[in-house]
Image: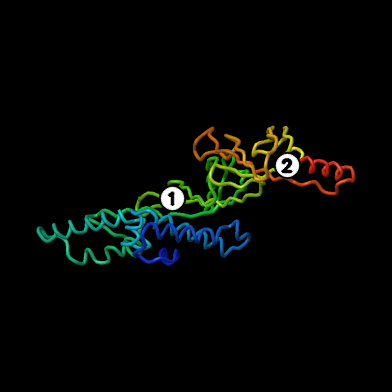
Amino acid sequence: MAYIDYYKILGVSKKATENDIKKAYRKLARKYHPDLNPNDKEAEQKFKEVNEANEVLSNPENRKKYDEYGEHWQHAEEYEKAKQQEQYQRSTSSQYGGYSEEDFSDFFGSMFGGRTGQSRGQQVRFKGQDFNAQLQLNLNDVYTTHKRTLTVNGKNIRITIPAGVENGQIIKIKGHGGKGVNGGPNGDLYIEFSIINNTQFKRDGDSLFASVDLDLYKALLGGDIMVNTFDGKVKLNVKPETQNGTKVKLKGKGFPKYKKEGQFGDLFITYTIKMPTKLSAKEKELFTELSKLR
């Protein structure tokens, strides 16, 4: 695995605070977001790299491992165990004999390439390589929980995609990465979701937002209208003398809450009043009379 400088990707120093990392990530995530860069493969790759860097550096434990072990940070625990084992063997060999310095040469080099590291006849076991994949879905696809088959490295994997998955979210499928070394566990598969919103609704978490046009007469006099929600139309009562830009909340008509079966956010409707055009002579006369009453 080639070394990836996550600090460089986010444009921060190794002394950056958690807040510095958060700010840098948000700025770059907005810059390279797929919705703002449609069909731009370079921006798509940058977005993926920024998310990967944030996944590591925003987690204090992962960041500590990365700072110490670089590209091998995911194998930090194996490194520590192997290091302790080597120190123990060196100690016992100096006391009782039986091992020479040559027995430990290239010890850590054997962990990620080269010959197989051995200790008292036993091979050192390591977790397999983690795989990364991206899955592109429409917003409608993640409104309900469903199953989908992915092909990763020539293998078909059947996964369940929970309703409410976010754009850019990464989920882990345990054990579906590369094969472990010397009987070690398989690596994991990390799937990043790229969700395309081709609906009239704007999404923010489990909240949805939409604009609804009102004619002048309905705004003035009130009445019932039919509005679109994500799962169908509902009747909505407009209050008399409704002002342009008025917002109303439809509770429970938003997007599903991630991994909370049967729970939904809210839908927020903003009224936009449309003024009548091409008035007839009679309409102009009536509006003139109304203006005089005011």
Vertical placement of 222 versus 197: above or below?
Answer: above
- Location of residue 128 in the rendering, given as x and y in whole percent from the top left corner: 40, 54
In this rendering, the answer to whether 294 lies above or below 58 is above
What is the count of numbered marks? 2
Q: Which mark is residue 250?
A: none
Q: Residue at x 70, y 35 (%)?
A: 240
For this rendering, which residue is in front, 290 or 67?
290
Q: Residue at x 60, y 49 (%)?
A: 137
Q: Position of residue 225 (x, y in %)?
A: 72, 35
Dividing the image into 4 quarters, which one contains the C terminus?
A: top right
**Distance between the alpha carbons at the discs numbered 2 and 1:** 52 Å
Is 265 on the left-hand or right-hand side of 89? right
Q: Is residue 267 left or right of residue 133?
A: right
Which residue position is annotated with label 2?
214
Q: Position of residue 87 (x, y in %)?
A: 19, 59
Res 234 seen here: no
141 to the left or right of 98 = right
In this view, the residue in front, 126 or 70, is 70
- The front one of 212 and 229 is 212
**Amino acid type, callout 1:** Asp
Q: Position of residue 136 (x, y in %)?
A: 59, 51
Mark 2: few, some, or many residues within 10 Å (few <14, many ≥20)?
A: many
Q: Quadrant of the N terminus?
A: bottom left
Residue 188 is labelled as: 1
Farthest left residue in view:
95
Indicate the secondary structure of the residue bearing disc 2: strand
Dot 1: element: loop
The mark that comes first in sequence, 2 or 1, is 1
Q: What amino acid is labelled 2 in the image?
A: Leu
Vertical side of 147 occupied by 94: above or below = below
For the residue carrying disc 1, how many other residues have a C-alpha within 10 Å: few (<14), some (14-19), or many (20+)? Answer: many
159, 6: nearer the viewer: 6
